[in-house]
Image (cartoon, rainbow, N blue to C red):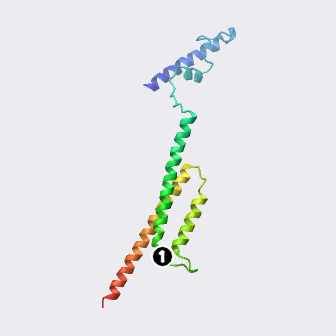
């Protein structure tokens, strides 16, 4: 239906353009000083979608709510990392506890991304971090199960 109306307007505009060309010599304009082109005619007479008007205060509020949400998620992820590192009690080749090494690296990663403002990058970092934590805990649990099974097999003759 909209396409037929648009076609009617285009046909009318085409006729008006022809008439305007004929009357160009007398410099008389049609349609009460109307539009010069088809696009102007369509812009003037077709309904346009209104964009919602958001004032500066509301835009700032929405931005703060979004940032607060991502801050909350980032803090939650950081706390999850700290909780997960409690299980890494062995030392590395230099004698440092893996728990401390992992916590230090997590802190560096969070500090590096502290002033990131792009929502896509922030979301990608949060998802990647939570995936890494869950993957590390899954691997740790699997290794502990294997060690328990080895001990059981070793204890039984």
Q: Quadrant for residue 141, please give it.
A: bottom left
Image coordinates of residue 56 in percent, x first then y, are 58, 35
Q: Quadrant for residue 55, please give it.
A: top right
Q: Residue at the left extreme?
A: 157
State whether residue 129 is above or below residue 69: below
State whether residue 57 is above or below residue 104: above
Residue under circle 1? 89
Image coordinates of residue 100 in percent, x first then y, are 54, 71
How many tags in the picture?
A: 1
Callout 1 secondary element: loop
Image coordinates of residue 145 in percent, x first then y, are 37, 76
Residue occupying the point 58% across, 22% down: 38
**Label 1 Cα crowd, 10 Å radius (few <14 / some 14-19 / many 20+):** few
Residue occupying the point 53% across, 36% down: 58
Tell me, yes or no, if residue 132 can be seen here: no
Q: Quadrant of the N terminus?
A: top left
Residue occupying the point 46% across, 26% down: 3
Q: Is residue 150 left or right of residue 126?
A: left
State whether residue 127 is above or below residue 144: above
The one of 32 and 73 positioned closer to us in this rendering = 73
Q: Quadrant of the C terminus?
A: bottom left
Image coordinates of residue 29 in percent, x first then y, are 63, 11
Tell me, yes or no, if residue 73 can be seen here: yes
Q: Residue at the bottom extreme?
A: 157
């Amino acid at each position: 239906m909209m396409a037929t109306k648009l076609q009617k307007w285009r046909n009318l505009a085409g006729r008006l353009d022809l008439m305007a060309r004929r009357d160009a010599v007398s410099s008389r304009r049609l349609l009460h000083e109307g539009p010069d082109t088809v696009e102007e005619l369509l812009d003037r007479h077709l309904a346009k979608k209104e964009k919602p008007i958001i004032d500066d205060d509301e835009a700032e509020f929405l931005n703060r709510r979004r940032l607060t949400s991502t801050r909350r998620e980032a803090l939650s992820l950081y706390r999850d990392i700290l909780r997960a590192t409690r299980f890494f009690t062995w030392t590395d080749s230099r004698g440092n506890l893996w728990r401390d090494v992992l916590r230090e690296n997590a802190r560096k990663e969070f500090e590096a991304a502290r002033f990131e403002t792009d929502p896509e990058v922030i979301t990608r970092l949060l998802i990647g971090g939570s995936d890494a934590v869950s993957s590390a805990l899954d691997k740790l649990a699997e290794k502990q199960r294997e060690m328990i099974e080895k001990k059981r097999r070793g204890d039984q003759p």
